[in-house]
Image: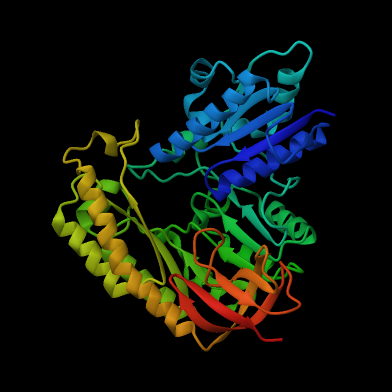
Amino acid sequence: MPTFALISLGCPKNLVDSECMGGALCRDGFRMVGEPGGADLVVVNTCGFIADAREESYAVIGEMAELRRRGDIGKLMVAGCLAEREREDLLGRFPEVDGVVGVLARDAIARAARQVVGEQAERQAIFQPPPCPAGDAERVRLTPPHVAYLKIAEGCNRLCSFCTIPSIRGPYVSKPFDQVVREAERLAADGARELVLIAQDTSSYGRDRTGGSQLAELLQRLDRVEPLRWIRLMYLYPALITDALIEAVNTCGKVVPYLDLPLQHIAAPILRGMRRGVSRAETEQLLDRLRGGIDGLVLRTTFMVGFPGETEQPFDELLDFAGRQRFERLGVFTYRNEPGTAAAALDHQVPEEVKRARHDRLMACQQPIAFAWGDRQVGRTLGVLIDRCIPGEKNAFVGRTAADAPDVDGVVYVTGKGLRPGRIAPCEIVARKGYDLIAAYQP
């Protein structure tokens, strides 16, 4: 039985692809191992979305190529977004790479791996056009057992001028409704207690199939899946949030009042340059609807600074907007030119030092807002999902409240006896430490 190691880079959507490739290889007779050293095959599932992600992918491929040259691993394959973006060029750049599998050819990974590790091994380059892979049911889970990502669609129809995703992952394709439900049921049966719904554009779910969003209906159906306890929505596009969706989030008992809503910017000239298709007035109306319609809502957003043409005036407008809206969670990215995008050809590019300064100013604006929100949690008793034990410490754990998405938000440090990962435990918040909280279990 040949062995394989899997290295997954990038976003949760890429992580689901990695889990599915791992499942396909295991079904085909490969055995998964935890470390690359000594493996018959190493698969690097890459991210190619932005320059920093590509550099990380190149670095990891380079490390594995060195192991391949030394004979510490058998064969080396590269998959994912960078593979889709650069295709056969990766074979030329890294002679040690034995196979390249594009992101939409994910389900061909086992066939390609057999060709690579076979007696008459030959280099492989496999790519497929849209639509996306049929399903994500049989996976080797790489997350903790109690947390699972459920990808409800693939691709994107948005034409944001800074984004390469449509050219990498193709047009938007929703999974069939019943298929999503079956995958959720399977993940729940496999131990998932928190289900995180993801897509490039989650709020568009179902529009390509029915002409209207089915996300509210999907939430109502998933709310009945046992033994799930939390359902979380990520990557919502602001233009397509319906009243039905707001009502579903507010009334479905398992859907946590947490929405990830990347806004990117708020100043009109920058929104036009980005091709976001949403105005400031529409965004403010939406935020009022969300906060008025969802009890205890926690909003996460992300902004991009340094987009071409962003002078001090639009940046100051963004800074003022963030200060007024007081988002509970906020992240900031600096714009990077991406080859092949419309924004890369725009005039009035912003110097790197200005981008960095604006990033720091916006984060400095957000920090006291986030800290004040954390301070308001002190004295409350909240459900905390225990993620892991703290090594070497007795009765000490790390968890998250419903206001904290995995890997992107703060955590809760919990003390208490009898806890275990996967349990949602009542805990009294006793202090704030930076962006994190300190709590004591209340049995």
Front residue of this view, candidates 73 and 56 = 73
| Residue located at (78% from left, 31% from top) | 3
Q: Nearer the viewer, residue 356 or 167?
A: 356
Tell me which residue sits at (63%, 42%) in the image.
Answer: 17
Can residue 295 be seen here? The reply is no
300 relative to 6 in the view: left or right: left
Can you tell which quarter of the image residue 9 is in? top right
Q: Quadrant of residue 80?
A: top right
Q: Is residue 275 visible?
A: yes
Spot occupied by residue 62 in the image (x, y as percentages of width and height): 53, 27
The colour scheme used to paint the residues is: rainbow
Is 120 displayed left or right of 346 in the figure? right
188 on left or right of 405: right
* Extreme-bottom residue of the structure: 379
Write the residue at 33% across / 74% down: 368
- Residue at the limit of the structure toward the front, as seen here: 392
In the image, residue 4 above or below residue 119:
below
Image x and y of residue 151, in percent = 61, 51
The furthest residue to the top:
120
Q: Position of residue 383 (x, y in %)?
A: 62, 79
Identify the image quadrant of the C terminus.
bottom right
Q: Across the whole image, how many numbered discs are drawn on residues?
A: 0
Quadrant of image for the N terminus: top right
Residue 213, image x, y percentages: 53, 59
